[in-house]
């Protein structure tokens, strides 16, 4: 695939699909060649909006399109297993939105399909591909703040969201944790890895999804991560990493930061800012570029968003849900028991 455009298919036509496609069409080495939806009318409207040559009213047609190098799956996460699985079984490479699936069992099934069929699979955890987040991780890995002791991160939206909203619908994997909490958990595990123990509490809605959740993730090193998410109140949406020799503070929007501050004992604070050449902070182009780089290199996984890391995050999300009592329809035995 070296030296040629990567041909993308878009599976779904909602807000995330539109955001990603808008960034894709601005990349000179990317070409969006097809889109699929559950209805042909929706697919055609999306295709006309972005100048996409082919529109399908079913997922299978896109999965079988031999002109598509990689499919971006942007359905609600309750459908990720079915949509991504269909594409993987047809031999298509896949970038699947976060949260990767409803639970770790489904995530393991997708990873297994990708490995059996020898195709590329990556979670669209754009935070991991953000240049400034990568810089933060490099500083931590290089010992800039010593041994990591604590990680704190939160993500909350003010709402209110009515009972009919997808964020409160169990059938669509509703609740704060999977939509928002995946970011604080992923940030913590980027720096600390998978926890050895999980404690959690939540406030549940009448529908049985979590309105807000807090969790304490413990690690064998003695490090702790405190994570929080909410769909009932707008939180600072910030993060911090404290080590034995200093601290890094990431202000509002830690998952797409425009700057962070490094505090080291005995030194003046040092600010790291995003490079304007990297584009708008909300851009999804970095994850798209990483997918295309990996495909051209013949890699089945991205080193920035490896499947084992995604599976570890899904296990932690399962453990949190098990402890707070959130179950989705049909998965009574899919979540690790508390």
Image (cartoon, grey):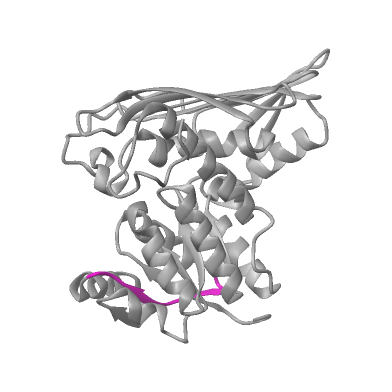
- What is the magenta segment's predominant secondary structure? strand
Q: Position of residue 277 (x, y in %)?
A: 62, 52
Q: Is residue 293 magenta?
A: no
Segment tinted magenta in the rendering:
28-38
Q: Position of residue 219 (x, y in %)?
A: 67, 27
Q: Is residue 53 left or right of residue 236?
A: left
Could you say which is closer to the camera, residue 323 or residue 22? 323
Q: Is residue 109 left or right of residue 136?
A: left
Could you say which is closer to the camera, residue 148 or residue 34? 148
Residue 277 seen in the figure: no
Q: Residue at x 62, y 37 (%)?
A: 189
Dividing the picture into quadrants, the one containing residue 205 is: top left
In this rendering, the answer to whether 230 lies above or below 74 is: above
Q: Is residue 35 magenta?
A: yes
In this rendering, the answer to whether 262 lies above or below 180 is: above
Q: Residue at x 64, y 55 (%)?
A: 306
Q: Position of residue 194 (x, y in %)?
A: 63, 37
Q: Is residue 101 left or right of residue 145?
A: left
Q: Position of residue 286 (x, y in %)?
A: 58, 56
């Amino acid at each position: 695939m070296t030296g040629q455009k990567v041909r993308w298919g878009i599976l779904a036509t909602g807000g995330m699909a539109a955001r990603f496609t808008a960034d894709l069409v601005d990349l000179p080495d990317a070409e969006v060649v097809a889109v699929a939806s559950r209805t042909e009318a929706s697919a055609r409207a999306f295709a006309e909006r972005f100048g996409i040559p082919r529109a399908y009213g079913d997922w299978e047609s896109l999965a079988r399109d031999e002109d598509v190098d990689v499919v971006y799956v942007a359905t609600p996460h309750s459908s990720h297993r079915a949509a991504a699985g269909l594409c993987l079984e047809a031999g298509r490479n896949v970038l699947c939105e976060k949260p990767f699936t409803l639970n770790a069992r489904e995530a393991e099934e997708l990873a297994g399909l990708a490995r059996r069929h020898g195709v590329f699979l990556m979670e669209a955890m754009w935070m991991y591909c953000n240049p400034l987040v990568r810089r933060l991780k490099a500083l931590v890995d290089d010992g800039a703040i010593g041994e990591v002791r604590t990680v704190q991160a939160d993500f909350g939206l003010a709402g209110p969201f009515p009972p009919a909203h997808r964020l409160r619908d169990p059938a669509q994997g509703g609740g704060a944790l999977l939509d928002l909490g995946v970011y604080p958990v992923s940030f913590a595990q980027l720096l600390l890895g998978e926890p050895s123990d999980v404690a959690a509490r939540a406030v549940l809605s009448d529908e049985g999804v979590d309105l807000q959740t807090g969790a304490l993730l413990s690690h064998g090193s003695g490090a702790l991560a405190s994570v929080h998410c909410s769909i009932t109140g707008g939180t600072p949406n910030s993060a911090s990493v404290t080590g034995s020799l200093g601290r890094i503070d990431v202000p509002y929007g830690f998952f797409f930061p425009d700057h962070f501050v490094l505090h080291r004992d005995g030194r003046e604070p040092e600010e790291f800012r995003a490079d304007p050449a990297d584009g708008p902070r909300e851009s999804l182009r970095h994850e798209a570029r990483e997918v295309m780089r990996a495909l051209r290199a013949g890699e089945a996984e991205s080193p920035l968003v490896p499947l084992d890391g995604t599976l570890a995050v899904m296990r932690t999300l399962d453990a949190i849900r098990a402890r707070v009592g959130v179950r989705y329809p049909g998965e009574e035995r899919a979540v690790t028991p508390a």
